[in-house]
Image (spheres, coloured by chain):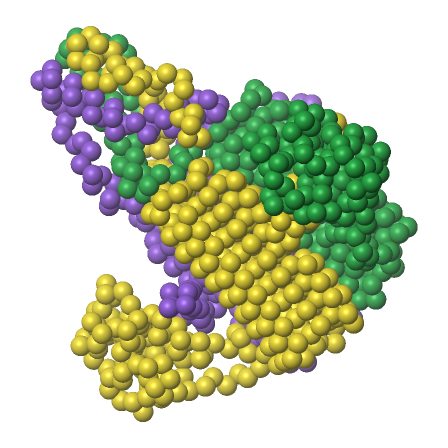
Chain colours: A yellow, B green, C purple
Amino acid sequence: MSRVAAAYTLGELAQRFGLDVIGDAAASISGVCTLSPGEPGRIGFLANPKYRATLAQTRAGAVVVGKRDAAALAGNGLVAADAARAFAQIARLFDRNRDFEPGVHVSAVVDSDAVIGQGVHIGPQAVIEAGAQIGDGSYIGPACIVGAGAQIGAGARLEARVHIHRGVRLGLRCQIQPGAVIGSRGFGNVPGPQGWEEMPQLGSVVIGDDVEIGANTTIDRGAIDDTVIANGVRLDNLIQIAHNCRIGEHTAIAACTGIAGSTTVGARCMIGGAVGINGHITIVDDVIILGRAMVTTSLLEKGVYGSGLPIAPAKDWRKTVARVRRLGKLEDRVRSLEQKTGIKTHDDGDDGNDGKDQL
Amino acid sequence: MSRVAAAYTLGELAQRFGLDVIGDAAASISGVCTLSPGEPGRIGFLANPKYRATLAQTRAGAVVVGKRDAAALAGNGLVAADAARAFAQIARLFDRNRDFEPGVHVSAVVDSDAVIGQGVHIGPQAVIEAGAQIGDGSYIGPACIVGAGAQIGAGARLEARVHIHRGVRLGLRCQIQPGAVIGSRGFGNVPGPQGWEEMPQLGSVVIGDDVEIGANTTIDRGAIDDTVIANGVRLDNLIQIAHNCRIGEHTAIAACTGIAGSTTVGARCMIGGAVGINGHITIVDDVIILGRAMVTTSLLEKGVYGSGLPIAPAKDWRKTVARVRRLGKLEDRVRSLEQKTGIKTHDDGDDGNDGKDQL
Amino acid sequence: MSRVAAAYTLGELAQRFGLDVIGDAAASISGVCTLSPGEPGRIGFLANPKYRATLAQTRAGAVVVGKRDAAALAGNGLVAADAARAFAQIARLFDRNRDFEPGVHVSAVVDSDAVIGQGVHIGPQAVIEAGAQIGDGSYIGPACIVGAGAQIGAGARLEARVHIHRGVRLGLRCQIQPGAVIGSRGFGNVPGPQGWEEMPQLGSVVIGDDVEIGANTTIDRGAIDDTVIANGVRLDNLIQIAHNCRIGEHTAIAACTGIAGSTTVGARCMIGGAVGINGHITIVDDVIILGRAMVTTSLLEKGVYGSGLPIAPAKDWRKTVARVRRLGKLEDRVRSLEQKTGIKTHDDGDDGNDGKDQL
């Protein structure tokens, strides 16, 4: 692992990523920084116009800006069609977290029946079981376990302590954070005379290319068919994906969200943190679900969805709960007023069946 | 590990599980499948009458059906009193996930003071500390840690990377998924002059027979007495059970649910996913709690419970939140109408004390 | 590890912790117990006056009480200004969970470039990478991973299977429960023409002194700057702290809570379980957030906050949901009544903009 950070001139960065230079193309950039306060010799970026005023004050050696902000830049910089994306590309040049040297650590346990590609790193205390295949250029970090017959596509990065169950298949360039469990037993139980009996989970998990999976996230294997995570999906930390779910391409899901079994989520969805999604439902493409939402039904039209009552002072919250609980009485009072004044506008009172269809 | 899947004739399966054959008793079954589309030589099942039409179209080699669906079956099949349970029994015959060979891997660290039963497998990189006892026929997968003095009953399966804290006791035939932590320190803190001080957690965790615990689930040890998980409990992934909780026999809890300290849950409860349950409360036997519910009080009668506002288009949701926030004003308006029209039906307005008892 | 529990006389305990003895100062105490039923030779405590009646019935060898309860104590005891804190101090004497012998297990992988302090224990299957520093008297349990260049302050306890990413810094006396992940990649992604691209996460995590982190909790490293956990913070199990969050001194957070990126939480806050907190917001010092709350906005005044609809029988819950959904209609009906009776008290109806600012 090299500890020497590379340095690039602004001109080199511009050429590499197709950007325009403002100021001194020979200025040397050895890392990234935020704009407030910024660091000389490092590069920051401005994507949110709200922070445009920082351009005048930053100590950053250079700033990546979009075209609309180029005029406001006092010092050196790079102009990009998409400043955040260009900055991400530059920042990847300085990311030492991906450096590794190929080789199998002496303490790793690699079955003689495993197939290890070219340029692979297998870290200390790792376990690669019989028949597992590790694609070229992959990094299998310390204490990772790759089960029997599992397939890891080329260019993977299993950071540390990742568990890949036997038979699970990952596409190319997947990146898995520590503690993630891919292929745990689906929660399948059938009632029997002595209590729960196990419904075997004989499916697997199939993960596409360029998928990222966060720390301590769990993805259960399917009952009969497989659980499927499509290309380009981004899963944050502590997410639960139950058996037989299917997550569509390029969908991103934030931390602490749980999806119950056999639910299908479309492509390019963005699902916020701590969302709970029922089993056996369908969410179509391009749906955005705001954080903490409770998804009890299929969402069959693209759009933005949310639910939940946001924070309030506890005293107000308690009053709100009480008011909601006496909403039935309030409806009765309004109905009574309507009847007694002879002003009848509605007839959709509390008939005991309300909401039945939705929940 | 055997990679050759066994095959059985329909007649053999019928005899083994007490089922009736429809069609060709000599038909060979080498695995399971779903009904749509189904696979020749494999067996599926029909439990939900909604899918009865698939019986006519499936390519499955055979189908397990209940009595009411037997007549609708065109091809080979088995008739069971409980089709799902019979299918589960058959599927377990084909479950290669439980195969193992006894023996201690050379990379495992087994203290000379540990007591290892007959026919036990201890996988690579596992750690068995002094005084730990592993019952006969148990599978201790790769990188599992069994702490000093812990007791693992016979027939256990600790899949991989399971942590069993010192002194924790598991009954017979427990099955623990990767990443689960049993016996972590309860969250006991007392305020002191310099900040939080540690309340030691000197209890343990006692787990009954036939318990399943999901991936990355955490169960804290008790403060003084033990945290107790009774026989036959099923816990899904990413569940938190805090110190001194007691979970009753055959209760099943879905993923992402958290239970705060010293709460008692009865027997045969079914608790949905992402439920939050307060500490120091009691939930009686046979309670069903729907997913995402917020359980702030004891539930002292069996029945079905739920809470939360389900998903809506974000625009509607925002309006709903605003309306709920002005419910107090709406109540005032109704009271004003009642007073001014002389139609007084209620007197239970917003007195500032509402809800106090419930929350 | 010593298996012989120490014993102390009541008089010794009183002297050590500055307490007053009631009864026999020579009574021997060899452990702790609860008051119901209590155990002879062990000591319990009474902090909640609700349980004062147990004092007359307990079989405990002694009881720690506050001054107001001293008169009600029939048997032996200790009187403390703060009974819970004094009990915690006594109980720590009996905590065998912290015992360890210094030394590096033969199966651990310790890079020759790592700096290991005096009196450090490094357990089986642990991995200490190049340049990592482990402070004096630290316990690094089985299968823990300390990444390259990470710094662990003196007196740390990494229980087992803890992952410390390269470059992460922990202060003095930190205690980390099994499965915790400190320094996983922040969830930074930028949209590109082919899908999500990685925004490198080049910051780290900086953790103060006396911090406790629970089992399977995850703390992401910062994007550019660091994620910061201040001195004395207590984090329970299965918590997610996203990149660039800052958690203030002595704040305690209960299990299953998630905090999105770049949020700042003040000092001495108490945050309940399963709370969801938005990104890029500020919570000031001394805020208390009740369990399951949904925090969508900054909380700029100290106080107690909450949200959510608590549990109800499912039938009632469904009616409540339906009533909340027709709140707009109810408002219309009240407005209509006001207009037709000529009793106009309000004019703040559903104008389509409601709630826009809050969410």
Q: Position of residue B125 (x, y in %)?
A: 75, 64
Q: Where is residue C303 in the image (x, y as percent from the top left)?
A: 35, 41
Give the residue displayed 20% in from the left and 8% down from the top: A340
Q: Where is residue B347 in the image (x, y as percent from the top left)?
A: 28, 13
Relative placement, left or right, of B346 versus B294 is left
Give the residue displayed 80% in from the left and 63% down from the top: B108
Give the residue displayed 67% in from the left and 47% down from the top: B39
Tell me if I can see residue B206 in this picture. no
- Name which quarter of the figure residue C349 lies in: top left
Q: Which of A322 and C48 is in front in this view?
A: A322
Tell me if I can see residue A16 in this picture. yes
Q: Nearer the viewer, residue A242 or B355?
A: A242
Q: Nearer the viewer, residue B175 or A38?
A: B175
Give the residue displayed 58% in from the left and 51% down from the top: A227
Q: Which of C119 and C222 is in front in this view?
A: C222
Image quadrant in which the N terminus of chain B is located? bottom right
Image quadrant in which the C terminus of chain B is located? top left
- The image shows residue A353, relative to residue C149, as above or below, that is above
- The image shows residue A25, relative to residue B239, as above or below, that is below
**Number of marks in the image?**
0
Q: Where is residue B327 in the image (x, y as percent from the top left)?
A: 27, 28
Give the residue furthest to the left.
Answer: C342
- Name which quarter of the figure residue C192 lies in: bottom left
Relative placement, left or right, of C65 versus A77 is right
Give the residue furthest to the bottom.
Answer: A26
